Image: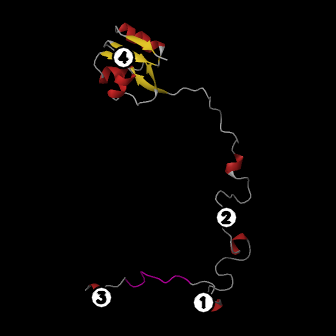
Amino acid sequence: MLHQLRPASGARKDRKRVARGNSGSGGTTAGRGTKGQHARTGKGKRFGFEGGQVPLIRRQPKLGGFKSPRRREYDIVNLMVLEKKLPAGHYTIEGLIEKRIIRSGTLVKILATGTISKKFELEVHAASKAAKKAIADAGGSIVLIK
């Protein structure tokens, strides 16, 4: 019966109640040893404390490098993506967003990863020299917009 179930003998053990006198074998130092940092109350150390050594966070360089304020982030479109996902034709930024090739609101750059055989006429913000050449060789063109 459920009300008769009990854990196996020795499976459960009461916790040791320390600092209740020497007769309880947990008195005097209460299992903390003798003296020292770990024997004191309030011994918790803050996060990142390394025992007095200069902590890792202070050993790191102070400044985190440099980011150009004029850096331009581009959404990259490779030739193999155009070849695989689009039929030949004329595409503007809006057309590429509609076909889910790029995200909206970003600059677009065409790169020459992969090969192309279809004729594309693209209006984008930037393109690599190799991509321009590959599209021109396939009979297409790239118009750069500002």
Mark identifier at residue 115: 4
Q: Amino acid at mark 3?
A: Gln
Magenta region includes residue 107: no
Q: What kind of element bears circle 2?
A: loop
Q: What kind of element bears circle 4?
A: loop
Mark identifier at residue 24: 1
Q: Residues within 10 Å of mark 3 (few under 14, many from 20)?
A: few
Total marks drawn? 4
Q: Amino acid at mark 1?
A: Gly
Residue 36 occupies quadrant: bottom right
Magenta region includes residue 13: yes
Residue bearing the label numbered 3: 4
Q: Is residue 95 left or right of residue 68?
A: left
Residue at the image position 67 percent from the left and 64 percent from the top: 45
Mark identifier at residue 45: 2
Percent position of residue 134, x then y: 40, 11
Real-space Cα separation, disc 2 to disc 3, in angstroms: 47 Å
Residue at the image position 32 percent from the left and 12 percent from the top: 119
Real-space Cα separation, disc 1 to disc 2, in angstroms: 30 Å
Q: Residues within 10 Å of mark 2 (few under 14, many from 20)?
A: few
Q: Amino acid at mark 4?
A: Thr
Of marks 1 and 3, the one in the foreground: 3
Query: Which region is colored magenta?
Result: 8-16
Of marks 2 and 3, the one in the foreground: 2
